[in-house]
Every structure is written in structure tokens, then in C-alpha cells.
Image (cartoon, rainbow, N blue to C red):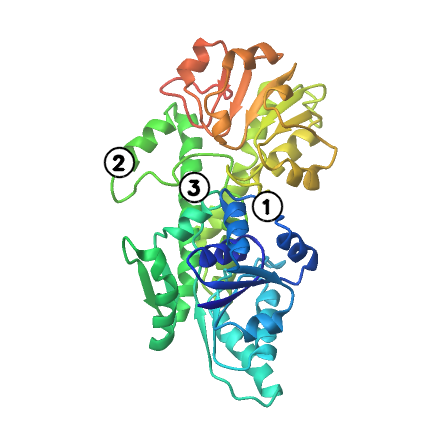
Amino acid sequence: MKICVFGAGYVGLVAAACFAESGNSVITVDIDEARIEGLKQGIIPIYEPGLKEMVLRNQAEGRLSFTSDAIAAVQSSLVCFIAVGTPPGEDGSADLKYVLGVAREIGRSMTGYKIIVDKSTVPVGTADKVRIAVQEELTARGMNLEFDVVSNPEFLKEGAAIDDFMKPDRVVIGTDNVRTAEIMKELYDPFMRKQNRMIVMDVRSAEMTKYAANAMLATRISFMNQIAGLCECMGADVASVREGIGSDTRIGYDFLFPGPGYGGSCFPKDVKALIRTAEECNYDFLLLKGVEEVNERQKDVLADKLIKALGSPDEERPLTGRTVACWGLSFKPRTDDMREAPAITIIGRLLAAGAVVRAHDPEAINEARKVFGDRIEYSHNQYDILASADALAVITDWSEYRNPDFDRIKAALKTPIIVDGRNLYKPDRMASAGFRYIPLGRCGGAVCPGVE
């Protein structure tokens, strides 16, 4: 099948590469000519495991190409995917200017029947706006061409996007046109070899499904962070609580790990957008407002613990003269994405408190430089940043941090303090090794370290 994908960002590039991998002819379109030229030369603008190899392979075999020529891409394709950004506006609503801009470009370029697919995360009713934008351009050209608009939200996890696309939990197709649904099923059939998990529904329900899914996952994260805080107050162990509730098949274990708050390109933006969508129809989404508030507070928890453990009586700059080593900068492992990363808030608080901050991350250092510049120190070696530091803060749960050399850590630190925002280590092991270990919500019947 001949496909064009508008947007060479995270969603668009992954989709284009995976569609090409299944044998389709795919053209990726982007207005950023520097990015397109880089892709033509094999320079991948994002880090995602397996993506570079897939792009290079399909490019070499002639199934995947890159261009800034929208007209040629549209005219040579049957299916046109819109996979551009929908950044939050000042009021939290999704900004659709890029989506509608692509829709108009398609309307100006098409010469025959097209299936226009919203792959971007968009609020309910966007397909109607896309349809109007395309039709206005056709009318201006004096042309009467048939087209369909489909909602096909993505459910990719950064760090596992290739596997998620190639072996999806489900594929949601929003359309009221039976013929269009069959074409979309044909496109996704190669990814359904083991089990058919395609779900066809009306367009508005498909648009809502994406937001509802991300809002539910964000809710679970904020819920567990609140439970961790309560465990600290009551002397309970959040790890045991998670095991106890996760064993209930109605609840399960996924997205029930306490941490420094959710981040990334999806959850923060989508929660805000769904709250705003509710407000537009005079519906007060109290639960999601709470989820968002909890998440913002949670980003301060690690900094608060470090200030409590290391701080002086100086209320304005209690960490003056202190050095904190931070493991992890990206919002989650297996990505270099710093968008809405908890590390931004945590490190910002530490700097404001007067601390010297050193940081390590396997992939996100270049992105972090765009945020912090030279206000913090960086190293590509996770142990180098520990020398004479007053504490180690674990922010992102990269696998490299899960079973480190604790003897080496203890020897390097000035004081053996670890504030663990991901609960990677066992408290009893850390205590026996001579560390002051400060996790989230892990007390086990004793007074929590860091809150006595």
C-alpha cells in the first residue's frame, strides 16, 4: 500500500518505519528541511531502541523515503497519516494548528480519493475539523473529490515503541465507512498474525479512547504516589501494598510503582487536554484535576527529602556547599525524552537551594543541556559523578542503576546517603551496607528514614 506520513517526530517516524517494515511504500513528510536532510543521511533525530536500524534498512531497500514536498507525497499515496504535534495551549487545550495545517495541505494537493488518518493525539471532534479544512481547500480549487477521515490513535510506550507497533495490544480504528474500515484492516493485518486485536468504532469514540487510556494510566500513577506518601505517615511498606493490591486481577500490577511523578510528551499534555475538553462542555472533571495536582506535588518530593537530609537552617539556600549526584534525567528509561521530566523540577529545586548538581543519564545528556546548560555538571560515567558528593538521588530507573556496585558508591560518596525515587533497592540490604537509604513509602512498620 502507498502511504505518506506527515511528521518525522516520534510517532510519525516510528509509524513510517514500521509500515515500511511490513512491505508498504512509505513517504515521510516534514517541513523541517534540516531534519529531512538528516534522515536522508541516516541521522535519526530521536533515540528509540531499534528505530535507527529499521529506518536504515527500509531506506536502503527503497520502501521508506523522506521529503519536504507534500504535494508529491500526497498525490502518490492512498493513505495520508497526520502525525504532527499537538502542544498544549496556555489554557491546557490541545493546539491543533499543525494538524489542521496538514489537513489543508492535503486538500490543496490531492487529485483523487484519499484516506486521511489522524494519528496525532487530538481532542474529540478533531476529525470533523480536519474534514472541514480539507473540504474548504477542495472547494477553493473548484474540485469535488471523495475522501474519508479516520481516527487511529497510537498507544506506543517510549522505549518500547517498535515492539508496541509491530505487536500491538490493540489497534483502534475510528470510522463510519465500511469500505475505509476494510482498507485500514488490510493495512494493519500484518501486525495481527497471532491475534486480531483491531477494534472498529465511531470516530469520536476513537478520539476519546486515546485520552481515556492515558488519563487512566496517569491516575494509577498518582494514586500510587499518594499511597506511598500515606505509607510513610503510617509506617507501612508501599512495595508490600502494591503486591497485595496488584494480585487482584481487577487491578493488576502495571503502573502501580511510586515514583517522582509522570512526565513525557503524553500524560501531562493529555490530562490537561481532557480536563479542558470537559470544561468546554461544562463538565467538572474533579478526578483528573486531582491527578494533575498530585503529580505536580510529587515532583517536589525527592527534592524535599534531599533538603531534609542535607539541608542547613538557611531557609533560602539550605543546600549551599552541598553536592548532589543524580542518576537519570529522561522522564523514563530507554528514551532521551526530557519533556515534562521530573528531573527538571527536582534539579531546579536543588539548584535553587544552592546545591552543586552532577548528573548522569545513558541517553538524555544532550537533551538535558538544552534545559540546564552549564548550570549542572554532566558525565557519561555513572560513578564519576559520585566523588565526594553528599548524596545520590536516583531519578530514572534505567537498568544500569538497578544492581550497581554499592561498595564503589559508598567509597565515593562523602556521606553514604541515597534518596531513591524509584525504590530500586531493598531497604534491609542498604541498611546492612551502611547506607542511609531514603526510598518512597517503604517503612515496613518502622519510622520512615528521612521523615523522623
Outermost residue on the front side: it is 61
Mark 1: which secondary structure? Answer: loop
Q: Earlier in the sequence, mark 2 or mark 1?
A: 2
Decide: few, some or many residues near mark 1? Use Cα within 10 Å; few <14, some 14-19, many ≥20: some
Side of 240 relative to 435 (left or right): left
Residue highlighted by disc 3: 221
Say which mark, if any, is on residue 390: none
Which residue is at 33% across, 67% downward?
A: 200
Above or below: residue 297 compared with residue 119: above
Structural distance between the alpha carbons of marks 1 and 3? 17 Å
Looking at the rendered image, the disc whose residue lies closer to the viewer, 1 or 3, is: 1
Q: Which residue is nearer to you in this view: 419 or 49?
A: 49
Q: Three-letter amino acid code at disc 1?
A: Arg
SS class, disc 3: helix
Residue 171 pos. (x, y %): 37, 59
Q: Are marks 2 and 3 in contact (CB under 8 Å)?
A: no
| Residue 317 visible in the current orientation | yes
Residue at far right of view:
374
Q: Residue at x 41, y 49 (%)?
A: 164
Which numbered marker is on residue 247? 2
Q: Pointer 1: what residue?
A: 339
- Within 10 Å of disc 2 (Cα), the crowding (few <14, some 14-19, many 20+) is few
Q: Residues within 10 Å of mark 3 (few under 14, many from 20)?
A: many
